[in-house]
C-alpha cells in the first residue's frame, strides 16, 4: 500500500439546494413525506417550486457536504459527481472548490440541468427534501477516476447513488478500485426510504463490501427490519470486523468496533434552525478523526461538533472554520 | 386621479446576489471599495468569483428588495426589471413572485445572462458589492408597462438605473407616465459612487422630478458636495414641497417634510450580521407607512424596524413576516 495524498474521496449526487420555509399544512397539501428525501421529476419540481416560498440557493448533495466539512476541518478531500455545464452547475463547482475540495468530474454538455433539491424547512427545524436528480443521472463508471480513488485513504459513498443504474455501476467500480488498492470503503445509508428501495442490495453491500458504515436510527432499523434501535444494533455488533457510526439526533451517536459499542453524547446547540446536513457533517467529523488516527470516541465527538454547527443555521455547508471550532472545544 | 390597485411599483436592476464572507485583506488584494457598489464586467466577475469563498445565492436588487419588503409588510407591490431566461433569472422571478410582488417584465431571450452581484461580507457586517449587470442592460422604455405605473400610488426608482442609457430612458418614461397620471415618484440615490457618477443629473432629478427622496448620509453629502450631514440637510430643508427620508445607520433617520426635520431612532439589533439591504428595507417600511397614510415619524419607525430585521441575518430579503414584526412592536 503506497502513501495517500487524499484523506477522503466522496462520490455522490452533485446537487444545488433550494431552501425555503414551509409549514406542516404545506407538506400535507402536497403530500410530502416529512423528514425524508423523495425523488421527483422535472414537472413535479416545477410545480413544487412554483408553490414554494422565496428561497436561498446553496450547494448541497450529501457526500459533497461531507467532504466540504472534512476540508473545513483541515482534511484533504476530493469529490466525484455530475453537474451540467449551466449556471447552477457553475455554482456547485465554485462552492466545492472554494471549500478546498478537489473536484474534476467533467460536466455534462447536454441533457438535463444540474440537480436541484427543494428543501422545505418547517418551524420544528426538520427538513423535507424533494430532489430532481437532473444531470446526476449521467454519472457513470467512466467518471470514477481510478487515480483519485487509489490516492484516498477512504472512499465515501452515498446510498443515494443506488437510485440510478449508471451511478450504481460507478459505485461498484469505485469499491473495486479502492479495495484493490488496499483502501477502505465507507457508506452512508442516506435515507430510510432509500434503504427500503434497495434493502437486499444494501444488506449485501454492508455484509461484504463496506468497511465503515454510517446510518441514523431510522436507516439502521429499516436495513435490518427491526423495530428498535437496540435490536438493529445487535446486528451491527455481530460483525466484529466492521466499523459503524450510528447517529440518533439529540441522543448522540453509537460507535461500534470489534463488537463493542461506544456511546457519544450530542453536542449542545443553542437553537436548532435547520437539520439539513446533520448526518453529512457528523460523517465529516468522524472521517476526519479516523483519517487522523484519533480514537473512536474522539471521532464521534468531532462528528457531533460538526453536526451541531450545521444545524444552528440554514444550509448544509459550514459557516465557520470547523478546524477552529473543534480546537475551541478540547477534550 | 383614479383609484390605485398597487401601492408601489418599483423599477430597478434585477439581480441575484452571491454572498460570501471575506476579510479586509481580501478587499485590499482585489482593490475593492469597502461598503460601495462597483460595476464590473463579465471577465472581472469571473475572476472575483473564482477567488470568492463558498457562497449562498439569493434574489436581490435594491428596488426589488424594497418591494419584497413592502409585500411582507402587507403592501400591494409590483416590480419592473430585466432578467434573462436562464436559471438565475428563474430564481429571481420565482422569489419576487413568491414574496407576493407582481412581476411581468418579459425576460431577455438572448444576450448577457441574468445579473449577479458578488457581495463580500466582512466581519464588521459591512457589505462590499461587485455587480455584473448582465441582462439588466436590456431594460428599456418598452419594459415600462404604462398601466402598471398608472395603477400605483408611488413609482419607486433606483439611482442605479442611471448607469445604463436604456435604463435611464426607462426611468424617464416611468416618471412621465406617473406624473401624468397624478402619481408620486420616489427615488433612492443608491450609492455615493453612483451619485458621483451622475451628480448633475441627479440634482436636476431631485430638484424637478422627484416627490420622495431616499438617501443615506454618504449619498446626500455627495449629492450636495457638503462635508457634513447637517450642511446637506440644509439643502434638503430648503425645498418645502419635497419629502425626504435620510438614513444614518445606527444614528437612525431624519424625515424632512415642509422644511421640518423629524428625527427617528434606529431600532436596536442584538447582532448585526450583514448590512446588505438596510437602506432598501428602510425604504420598504417608509413607503408602506406612507401609502397607508401613517404620520411621518411612524413611516420612519416602520422603516427602522424593517431595516433592523434585514441586518440581523445574511441576505437582503426578509426572513420573517414584517407585518407580524411591526405588529409586535406597537408605538
Image (cartoon, coloured by chain):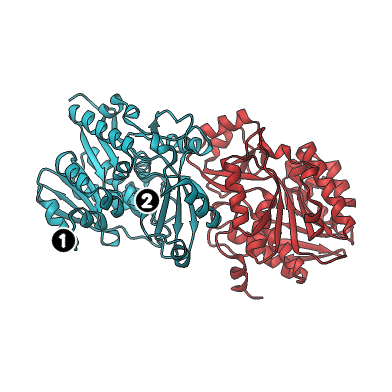
Chain colours: A cyan, B red
Classify B25 as above or below B228.
Answer: above
The circle drawn on residue A268 is: none
Of B29 and B94, the residue lying toward us = B94
The answer for which chain carries disc 2 is A
The 10 Å Cα crowd at callout 1, few under 14, some 14 to 19, many 20 or more, is few
B276 or A23: nearer the eye? A23
Where disc 2 sits, the SS reads loop
Name the residue that disc number 2 marks: A277
In this image, B303 relative to B87: left or right? right
Residue B226 x, y percent position in the rendering:
81, 47
A191 sits to left or right of B133 = left
Residue B245, horizontal then vertical, whole percent: 76, 59
Chain ID of residue with mark 1: A
Q: Please report the residue visible at 66 percent of the width from the left and 42 percent of the height from the top.
A: B83
Left or right, B313 with respect to A170, comes to right
What distance separates the C-alpha of mark 1 from that of mark 2?
A: 25 Å
Identify the residue position indicated by label 1 in the image: A230
* Chain-order first, disc 1 or disc 2: 1
**Vertical placement of B308 versus B190: above or below?**
below
Q: Quadrant of the N terminus of chain B?
A: bottom right
Where B197 sits versus B329, above or below?
above
Quadrant position of the C terminus of chain B in the picture: bottom right
> CB under 8 Å between callouts 1 and 2?
no
Q: Residue furthest bottom?
A: B331
Q: Residue at x 53, y 62 (%)?
A: B270
Discs 1 and 2 carry the same chain letter: yes
Residue A200 at what x, y percent from top left? 19, 47
Which of A90 and B325 lies nearest the eye of the viewer? A90
- x 44%, y 55%: residue: A313
Amino acid at each position: 500500500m503506497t502513501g495517500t495524498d487524499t484523506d477522503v474521496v466522496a462520490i455522490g449526487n452533485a446537487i444545488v439546494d433550494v431552501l425555503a420555509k414551509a409549514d406542516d399544512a404545506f407538506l400535507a397539501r402536497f403530500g410530502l413525506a416529512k423528514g425524508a428525501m423523495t425523488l421527483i421529476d422535472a414537472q413535479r419540481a416545477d410545480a413544487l417550486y412554483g408553490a414554494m416560498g422565496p428561497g436561498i440557493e446553496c450547494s448541497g448533495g450529501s457526500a459533497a457536504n461531507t467532504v466540504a466539512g472534512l476540508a473545513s476541518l483541515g482534511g484533504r478531500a476530493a469529490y466525484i459527481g455530475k453537474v451540467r455545464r449551466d449556471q447552477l452547475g457553475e455554482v456547485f463547482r465554485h462552492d466545492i472548490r472554494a471549500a478546498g475540495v478537489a473536484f474534476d468530474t467533467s460536466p455534462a454538455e447536454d441533457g438535463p440541468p444540474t440537480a436541484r433539491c427543494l428543501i422545505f424547512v418547517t418551524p420544528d427545524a426538520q427538513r423535507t427534501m424533494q430532489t430532481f436528480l437532473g444531470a446526476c443521472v449521467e454519472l457513470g463508471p467512466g467518471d470514477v477516476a481510478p487515480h483519485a480513488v487509489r490516492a484516498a485513504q477512504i472512499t465515501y459513498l452515498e446510498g443515494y447513488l443506488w437510485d440510478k443504474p449508471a451511478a450504481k455501476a460507478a459505485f461498484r467500480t469505485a469499491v473495486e478500485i479502492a479495495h484493490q488498492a488496499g483502501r477502505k470503503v465507507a457508506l452512508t445509508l442516506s435515507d430510510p426510504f432509500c434503504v427500503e428501495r434497495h434493502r437486499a442490495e444494501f444488506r449485501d453491500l454492508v455484509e461484504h463490501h463496506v468497511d465503515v458504515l454510517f446510518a441514523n436510527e431510522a436507516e439502521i432499523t429499516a436495513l435490518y427490519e427491526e423495530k428498535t434501535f437496540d435490536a438493529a444494533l445487535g446486528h451491527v455488533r455481530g460483525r466484529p470486523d466492521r466499523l459503524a457510526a450510528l447517529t440518533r439526533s439529540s441522543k448522540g451517536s453509537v460507535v461500534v468496533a470489534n463488537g463493542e459499542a461506544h456511546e457519544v453524547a450530542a453536542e449542545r446547540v443553542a437553537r436548532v434552525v435547520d437539520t439539513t446536513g446533520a448526518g453529512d457533517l457528523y460523517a465529516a467529523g468522524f472521517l476526519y478523526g479516523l483519517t487522523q488516527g484519533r480514537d473512536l470516541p474522539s471521532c464521534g465527538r468531532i462528528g457531533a461538533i460538526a453536526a451541531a454547527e450545521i444545524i444552528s443555521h440554514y444550509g448544509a455547508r459550514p459557516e465557520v472554520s470547523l478546524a477552529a471550532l473543534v480546537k475551541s472545544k478540547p477534550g
